[in-house]
Image (cartoon, coloured by chain):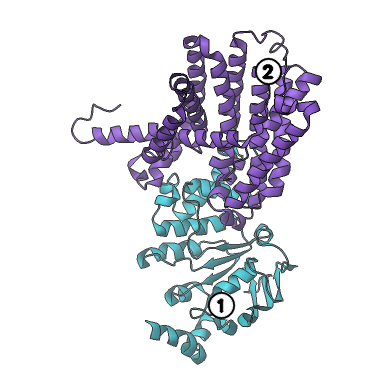
Chain colours: A purple, B cyan
Amino acid sequence: MTMAGRTASRTGVAGAHPPPAARRDLGWIGIPLVAVAGLAAFWLLPDDLALLTRIAASALFVLSLDLVLGYGGIATLGQAAMYGTGAYAAGIAAVNWISDPFALLAVGGLAGGLIALVTGALILHAHGLTLLMLTIAVGQIVQEIANKARDWTGGSDGLSGIDPAPVLGLFRFDLYGRTAFLFALAVLVVALMVARRIVRSPFGLACRGVKEDPLRVSALGGSPKSYLVALYAVAGVFAGVAGALTAVTSGIVGLDSAGFPWSAEALVMLVLGGTGRLYGAVIGTAVFMGIHHILASSDPFHWMGFIGLFLIGIVLFLPGGIASGAGRLSALLSALARPGRDGGRA
Amino acid sequence: MSGAALLEVEGLSRNFGGLQVASDISLTLRAGDRCALIGPNGAGKTTFVNLVTGVIPPSAGTIRLAGRDVTGLPAAERVRLGLIRSFQVARLFRSMTVREHLELAVLQRDRRTFRLFASVARVAGLAGEVAELLDAMGLGAVASTAVGSLPYGQQRLLEIALAVAMKPKVLILDEPAAGVPHAESQRILDAIDRLPTDLAVLMIEHDMDLVFRFASSIVVLAQGRLLCSGTAAEIAADPQVREVYLGSRADAR
């Protein structure tokens, strides 16, 4: 997969492995894997569907962050601004006007994309810490607007009363959350396919160029800022859809959906899973929220400490995130297999 | 030698405070010209390149590209008009493969980089053109190698390939063989020899062997001013040049 080729080339041993491009073509396998893993979880954990639905929607949110950070190199702690905007836009539309779940996702995506386009055009001339501060500020502003516009958003009480129509007019959102989870999983899988398409497009190539060396892109005649603003807007659409998906499947939207902690948590999940690989977002979210769920119920006082230790371990021993582990493992196995027996390859 | 004037620089000056780093430089490059810009360290060669390409604005003077005044245009706009430079230190995207570099350059040139849902692999005509560029530069064998793990000489070749991929009118090569072992610099010179004959090339170079093999005309810069210019033979025989440039270089060695 992608990860193997990248890791190899970073450490300068690319010659010992098949060329990265040949491996990258296998990256599509991850998408059916996510679908199968999701369906397996659906059968194996029928009592945890609410959690699994949250994981799927959150993974979509973290995926949007990966587009921005992993493919554009934009450091942000304000991605929740787009998520919250999408969630509130879909929630308000659901309460007042429309109930079709797909239309609600479209509303959320549009809202998230628009806010990202506008704020991105305003702040993306900045870099590093300045940009980080500006993204936090945008998040705080969005959250404060949601807090003040009580008539529309319910303020600190949250927005409730979202009652979406059956999916495709056929599948009602049931009490057990079966429809909700399968809907969320389907949206995540489609989003992964679209994201993969985008990162492999000419646009995705140009964004990777900007991430590595914006000045070199200028020297090729490109405008780094317009790529970044466009990428920020595209990722805003993903985040907005993720917010709308949460609103549709959970039925409520709270102020924390646009809050700084949610942006920061998304960053933690992405780093845990691995940046710049798309699947890292899904893996990181599932691992983080899964551990959170298990530890928080068994040891409600210290679970955050365990998460912290786990994160330190990952950063120290798998700097590329969990998703890089597969590539490292196969490199290790082939290195072990080379001297002596050659039948022992995994 | 009598091609259309592609790059016309007139009275180009730049001072940083009281320091005059370029003063009243004029230069014309015509289609087919192979011109070398030489001068001792600190003569203002790189400053001149930065002025011409628009990285820093001039204090005075005009720059015309194929007859059009580009003095006020930003660097990226000049690139789109066909004024391309290569960098003295290879500036490449380390994690991207050789092929991806050329794809990006060609897509950028054709302004097809805002296609979000097309696959790079299926853009019409792209694979063929990239394959031609790879062949022309002898980079076919390393097409799928990440540039970060490529030997420096091949990085320089890629740097030139990128410039060629942009289909320039005027190409400025800033020390294309800097840092490359002498044995390999021949490959770079070969690549330069194969450049399309209708473009104007300005090469900034220290290595006098390369300069005399490449250039039909030579411009000598010293302390930010144009010392003299002429054919390679004239410059080699010029006593002033010998003293200011070749002489000081010999001392340094």
Closer-to-camera residue (B169/A253) = A253
Say if B236 sits above or below A174 in the image.
below
Determine whether, in the image, residue A173 is placed left or right of residue A312: right
Q: Position of residue B190 (x, y in %)?
A: 45, 63
Q: Going by the image, does A96 lie left or right of B154?
A: right
Q: Which mark is residue B44?
A: 1
Classify mark 1: helix, strand or loop.
loop
- Res B154 quadrant in image: bottom left
The answer to whether residue B249 shows anywhere in this view is: yes
Quarter where residue B33 is shown: bottom right
Which circle, 2 or 1, is nearer the viewer?
2
Q: Nearer the viewer, residue A309 or A162?
A: A309
The residue carrying mark 2 is A251
Q: Is residue A73 left or right of residue A169?
A: left
Q: For mark 2, name the chain.
A: A
Q: Same chain for the residues at labels 2 and 1, yes or no?
A: no
Give the residue drawn at x 41%, y 46%: A10
Q: How many marks?
A: 2
Q: Residue at x 60, y 83 (%)?
A: B225
Position of the N terminus of chain A by quadrant: top left
